[in-house]
Image (spheres, rainbow, N blue to C red):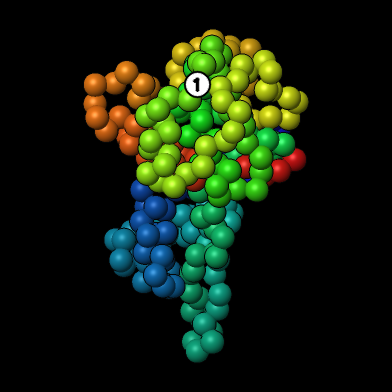
């Protein structure tokens, strides 16, 4: 697994720092739906013009806002948000991998569901494995997969040592598995084990949690 930053760290830090001041955050909020002149902003926020100028300079330097001169009264300028000015706030580290491998202890439920969910919506290959694989996929996982028309991967539970290859992105979906792999770079999802749970909705809860996390992760992983 390689890690690559979509935006330089300094750019992200600059934007976060610029918005750390309450007044600058209010300026950005005021510009979300439309542009405003500096005098309008000063009146709206109730701050002096020289202090507003300082805040605008900071936001401009961070690449959040820009000014343009009025086509009517050329003495006036209007401040607007740059189209991608706030992008660093939502851009996370991008992961580059040849394959995604989901791991839990038995490889009988959570990791199986995660790999199947990943393969249903992504071109990047996926696999699953366990630190102590069971003999078969748990019936509860089979049932929840069938109810969601999700095709589980063939082959049954497998041991992690037999599955991992160079370039894999490892995602542990079980606390025990994560704690057993201290030397393996991983992402970790702390998902309660539905196997043996007294809750009748345990597998549905696990399925929903995994599905949400898979969808989120997919936005940040690219093929090596």
Estimate the x, y position of residue 20 in percent, counting from the top left: 43, 43
Q: Which residue is mark 1?
A: 136
Residue at the spot 60% in from the left edge and 48% down from the top edge: 122
Of the pair 65 and 96, the residue shown nearer to us: 96
Residue placed at 48% from the left, 74% from the top? 78
Q: Residue at x 50, y 75 (%)?
A: 77
**What x and y, as percent, mark residue 70?**
52, 82
Q: Nearer the viewer, residue 136 or 93?
A: 136
Query: Which quadrant of the figure has residue 160?
Result: top right
How many other residues sit within 10 Å of disc 1, few (<14), some (14-19) or many (≥20)? some
Q: Quadrant of the C terminus?
A: top right
- Residue drawn 52% across the image and 62% down it: 65
41 to the left or right of 78: left
Can I make out residue 33 in this image?
Answer: yes
Location of the N terminus (image quadrant): top right
- Position of 223 with respect to 156 (left or right) is right
Residue 108, above or below 42 = above
């Amino acid at each position: 697994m390689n890690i690559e930053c979509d935006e330089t760290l300094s750019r992200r830090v600059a934007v976060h720092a610029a918005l750390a001041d309450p007044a600058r955050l209010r300026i950005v909020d005021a510009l979300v739906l439309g542009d405003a002149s500096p005098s309008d902003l000063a009146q709206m926020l109730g701050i002096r013009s020289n202090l507003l100028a300082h805040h605008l300079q900071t936001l401009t330097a961070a690449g959040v806002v820009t000014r343009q001169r009025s086509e009517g009264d050329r003495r006036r300028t209007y401040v607007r948000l740059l189209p991608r000015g706030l992008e660093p706030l939502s851009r996370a580290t991008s992961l580059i991998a040849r394959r995604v491998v989901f791991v839990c202890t038995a490889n009988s439920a959570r990791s199986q569901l995660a790999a199947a969910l990943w393969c249903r919506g992504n071109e990047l290959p996926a696999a699953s494995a366990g630190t102590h694989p069971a003999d078969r996929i748990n019936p509860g996982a089979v049932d929840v997969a069938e109810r969601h028309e999700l095709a589980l991967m063939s082959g049954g539970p497998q041991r992690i040592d037999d599955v991992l290859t160079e370039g894999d992105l490892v995602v542990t979906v079980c606390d025990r598995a994560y704690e057993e792999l201290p030397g393996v770079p991983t992402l970790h999802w702390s998902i309660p084990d539905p196997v043996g749970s007294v809750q009748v909705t345990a597998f549905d809860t696990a399925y929903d949690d995994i599905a949400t996390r898979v969808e989120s992760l997919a936005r940040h992983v690219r093929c090596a």
